[in-house]
Amino acid sequence: MTCAIVALERCWYLSPPWSQPIPSLEVHLSEKVYLTTNQAFGYCCGVLWQEDKWVYAFVKDVGEAIAVDRSITYVTKHEIIGTGQVKSTYMRKPAFVLGDRVMLRFDSHATKQRLILGIVLVNNAWFYVVELMSPALVQPLAARVRFPLVGEQDLIRVHV
């Protein structure tokens, strides 16, 4: 019975929620965007898969640098217009891309492999969204977070 549960968990965590192929993004990370609801320009500082669609993290433009320590607004593709202008920054690119298969260094569960479901810039560092628990386990364990932000140092790339 334990082998069946482990196999089911492995299939769950490695099955992309968006089916195949991965849906294209409306804008790129660090791209200048116009937020229609606030009528303001800013930059895309993250993207994650949530409720069957991409959700974009948006930070308001304050001049020379991307203000990652300012408040972040989460919007859908219907609320932003990409400009095609990608802000060149001193920051290095994210180590992982959406859909990459990774292993968690800290997870004590039998199934350690997960998919990258999002990338977010927080205080000048890239963090990655992975599914830690299946939806059936979230309700009884309300204190646990289903989709935590995980740092690059806690992930190992899995080559398939």
Image (tube, rainbow, N blue to C red):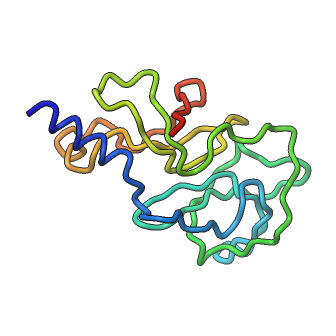
Number of dots carrying numbers: 0
Q: Is 45 rendered above or below residue 152?
A: below
Query: Where's residue 129, x and y in %?
Result: 50, 44
Q: Residue at x 53, y 50 (%)?
A: 99
Residue 81 at x, y percent in the picture: 72, 75
> Which residue ends up furthest to the front in the rendered image?
160
Find the residue positioned furthest to the left: 1
Picture residue at 70% right of the left edge, 47% below the top: 70
Q: Residue furthest right?
A: 64
Q: Position of residue 85 (x, y in %)?
A: 86, 64
Left or right position of 16 against 152: left
**Is residue 146 toward the left or the right of residue 118 in the image?**
left
Q: Does residue 156 lie above or below 54 as drawn?
A: above
Location of residue 91 (image quadrant): top right
Q: Is residue 46 left or right of residue 116?
A: right
Residue at 84 percent across and 59 percent down: it is 86
Relative to the observer, which residue lies in front, 160 or 43? 160
In which quadrant of the rendered view does residue 106 lie?
A: top left
110 vs 115: above or below: above
Q: Whole-percent x and y of residue 31?
A: 78, 60
- Of 15 and 52, nearer the camera is 15
- Left-right relation of 132 to 80: left
Residue located 57% across and 51% down the image = 98
Q: Quadrant of the N terminus?
A: top left
